[in-house]
Image: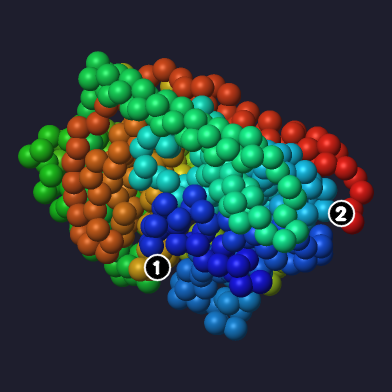
Amino acid sequence: MTLAAASGLMLTCSFPKIGWHYMAWVSLVPLLVCLKDTSPFNGFRLGLVSGLVHQVTLIYWMTITMHQYGQLPWAVSIPVMLLMAFYLALYVAVFSWLLVRYIHKPLLRMISIPILWVALEYLRANLLTGFPWELLGYSQYANLHWIQLADLSGVYGVSFLIVLVNAILFFTLQEVLNTKNAPRVSWPFVLGVPASGLAILMLVWLYGDYRIQQTDEQIKNSPSSRIGIVQGNIEQSMKWDPSFQEATVRKYVELSLGIKTRLPELIVWPETATPFYFLYDDALSKMVVNGIQQAGTDFLFGAPSFFMKDNDLHYFNSAYLVDAEGSVKGKYDKVHLVPFGEYVPLKKWLPFIGKMVEQVGDFQAGAKGSVIPWKDFRLGILICYEGIFPDLAREAVKNGASVLINITNDAWYGRTSAPYQHFSMAVFRAVENHRSLVRSANTGFSGFIDPGGRILSSTELFEDAAITRKIPLLSGLTVYARMGDAFALLCLVLSPVLVLAGGLRPKP
């Protein structure tokens, strides 16, 4: 039990805010040791413990968000977070149970471990609207050579590599120590397994080095544009207060005018930077347009929007592109909405549950893959939570997006680890598609990520900031952009095959 809990803690330490990324490569070894000589029931229980420890220490920030901004009492916020952690931990429990019950032969088990893990990650990312928050591969966001694999397989390929290394370390350690009930394995096997692992790591590193150099060459030969980011640093408690709306607009305009001399071609404000219905609130809309005209450049900013259809109001979380003259040139409506944040699932059966954003009605989803034409290029927009769903960025790129722009409001998270975690996942959207990613966050982190995954510059949390950067505008499609999650789907298809190959009879 202690070793299982240790695995959970080590997994969490691999991610920001702690960020000991190297720990991910050994984090599952204690759990695998626990599973070596145990029953299927205990395997499930140990996996659940490991998953619970990991998820509770990873997503603890949910309680703060629900209590401080959702106005839920601690007596409700904590159990809701624990319920979510329990659900996520079930995937580790099922992983452990499958290994113990069905897959006993060492070689088959070593192969099965990374395949089953990735298959379950893929299910977690897609079932029940999906929650792919900090999948294992994301822990390596700062390691450029390893994450280049994502342009082939997405984050799942990096997860696979990490879990494979864990499995190889476990089997090598098991034979070297030759514990009492360990299955006998031949020395050629023992020597061949780590050698094969090292060969795979070397190939992945060489591929990463090749792709980094190739991407840098593409950047040199591609057009570029100077983009500005404004971080208004508006407290969530003030954001939707009508008495602060004018001050909010004035602050964003002043920060934008402060970078006018750097000649940005586009200035980006965060999600709902204008907390009113743009073009419908005349006075505030005029302030925004006047500010844009003073800056003399194009702007992209977030605002709620609506339209009337069949006597019903339809609300959207949107991004507007407005040119230097103040004319709207494009609009994007958020596709993947946050349950209980932007809409209430099963509202007909759960009328007593409200949203955390009460200033507008339930948001509706926009069209997947929509892009906004801008000059000779197209902008792929990701609003807040959408940045953790790779298929949305991929669809935008397939529709011609030359740059990805993530606008978000992470004020909900306070000074917890969540803003660090959220920003780290954006790195993969750049690598997967070989596109620059511009991120504008209300309270941070805002920044620029190049097509190879380098964080070129970023702001600090809870500071007023306005920064600019010239970024490359690449074209072309990566293997991942073309094929999507084919690798993860392959793991999903192979999983039942491996279970059958392992035998349907329980371990004696």
Viewer-nearest of labels 2 and 1? Answer: 2
Name the outermost residue toward the front.
Answer: 187
Q: Nearer the viewer, residue 240 or 167?
A: 167
How many residues crowd around disc 1 within 10 Å: few (fewer than 14), some, or many (20 or more)?
Answer: some
Q: How is the image coloured?
A: rainbow
Q: Position of residue 25 (x, y in %)?
A: 49, 50
How many numbered callouts? 2
The amino acid at mark 1 is Thr
Q: Is residue 317 visible?
A: no
Q: Quadrant of the C terminus?
A: bottom right
How many residues crowd around disc 2 within 10 Å: few (fewer than 14), some, or many (20 or more)?
Answer: few
Q: Is residue 245 visible?
A: yes
411 to the left or right of 81: left
Residue at x 75% of width, y 33% of height: 493
The answer to which image quadrant residue 293 occupies is top left
Q: Nearer the viewer, residue 109 or 131?
A: 109
Q: Position of residue 363 (x, y in %)?
A: 56, 52
Would you name the residue on which mark 2 appears? 507
Label 1 near label 2: C-beta < 8 Å? no
Q: Earlier in the sequence, mark 2 or mark 1?
A: 1
Q: Secondary structure at mark 2?
A: loop
Above or below 163: residue 62: below
Q: Nearer the viewer, residue 82 or 251?
A: 82
Would you name the residue on which mark 1 appears? 416
4 to the left or right of 155: right
Q: Position of residue 245 (x, y in %)?
A: 30, 62
Residue at x 50% of width, y 76% of height: 67
481 to the left or right of 269: right
What whole-number distance in Å separates the C-alpha atoms at marks 2 and 1?
Answer: 43 Å
Above or below 19: residue 104: above
Residue at x 83% of width, y 37% of height: 501
Q: Position of residue 154 (x, y in %)?
A: 52, 35
